[in-house]
Amino acid sequence: MLGKPPRPQHCQLCRRQTPHLTVHHLFPKSRHRDTKLVKLHGKQRLRLAVEWLCSACHKHLHRMINERDLAYHYCSLEKLQAHPDIDEFVQWLRTKPDDFTPKTSRRRRS
């Protein structure tokens, strides 16, 4: 049985090197019993599909995209990077130092 990918040295979205990376489940854990998702991807993929993100990127994407949309439409790193709000945030964050933590955004989910 495969495990989650090893922890990289940088955030998978913004590529900043930060000591505090979090595991982002590409299929939110609240959706792991969704029969349609299980049928499409299999239980093992639902559990093991993760990316390592800095807390700023992780918090931002959960503010911008609800869990259903994450599971059905943004279940890969490439799809997350293609989301306009995520891409705009990541491009901005890449200009900041590795230890920079942005203030909480007040934008609402789409």
Image (cartoon, helix red, strand yellow):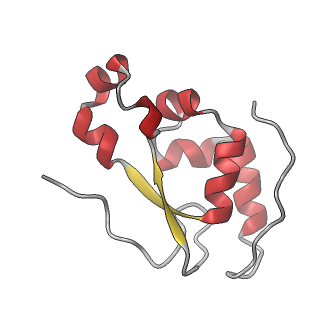
Locate residue 106 relative to residue 66 in the image: left or right. right
Report which quarter residue 14 is drawn in: bottom right
Name the residue located 75 percent from the left edge and 77 percent from the top edge.
100
User: The C terminus appears in which quarter of the rendering?
Assistant: top right
From the viewer's perspective, tell me whether residue 108 is left or right of residue 69. Answer: right
Residue ID at (65%, 37%): 65
- Outermost residue toward the right? 106
In percent of width and height, residue 53 lies at 54, 62
Kindly identify the residue that appears in the image at 65 percent across and 41 percent down.
83
Of the pair 92 and 36, the residue shown nearer to us:
36
Quarter location, residue 59: bottom right
In this rendering, position of residue 110 left or right of residue 59: right
Q: Residue furthest top?
A: 36
| Figure check: 103 above or below 62 | below
Instruction: Identify the residue at image location x=62%, y=64%.
Output: 55
Give x and y (percent) for residue 42: 24, 31
Check the image and report above or below for 32 versus 16. above
Asked if 49 appears above or below 10 in the picture, the reply is above
Place of residue 57 in the rendered image (x, y in percent of width and height, measured from the top left) = 65, 59
Q: Is residue 4 left or right of residue 34?
A: left
